Image (spheres, rainbow, N blue to C red):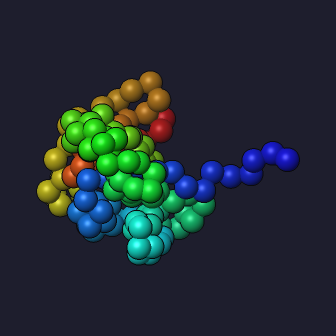
Amino acid sequence: MPLTALTHSRLFVLDQDQALDFYVGTLGLEVAEDVELGFMRWLTIRVPGHPELEVLLERPGPPSLDDATAAQLRELIAKGAGGTLIFATDDCRATYDELRAKGVEFSEEPTERPYGIDCALRDPSGNAIRITQRA
């Protein structure tokens, strides 16, 4: 039986509340689920109008990682060696201007590439984000 969809992806973050404020309050995504499970907080976000893919904003630790591994991973995330999210937009330069006006600091301004125009930033945990306008 073939796979039919990718429904969730995980992104490790250092602080779930800070990540929630950034992704929802600044970037304009929406909360899909925010459930306290006791052993972890299940916090997922998604692009509004696109329920087919949610991103789990997970704090490194149990149950998926032991304490030593979680500590190593937190160090790597803070150095920018965590995950990457790539978002699509119809107008990269306008999105860049809008987010700069909200105080977002970019690591790369909109740049024309063979595949379109994109720019880069990091979330509060250090994860890479690219915003792309396809050619």
Residue 70 at least partly seen: yes
38 and 49: which is toward the camera: 38
Residue 120 position in % (x across, y down) = 28, 39
Residue shown at 23% from the left, 63% from the top: 18
Residue shown at 55% from the left, 55% from the top: 8
60 and 129: which is toward the camera: 60
As displayed, is residue 129 above or below residue 48?
A: above
Left or right: where 75 falls relative to 69: left
Residue shown at 60% from the left, 60% from the top: 52
Q: Residue furthest top?
A: 114
Residue 119 position in % (x across, y down) = 30, 38
Residue 112 position in % (x across, y down) = 35, 29
Residue 26 at least partly seen: no
Left or right: where 112 falls relative to 101: right
133 and 7: which is toward the camera: 7
Residue shown at 17% from the left, 60% from the top: 102
Residue 27 position in % (x across, y down) = 31, 60
60 and 12: which is toward the camera: 60
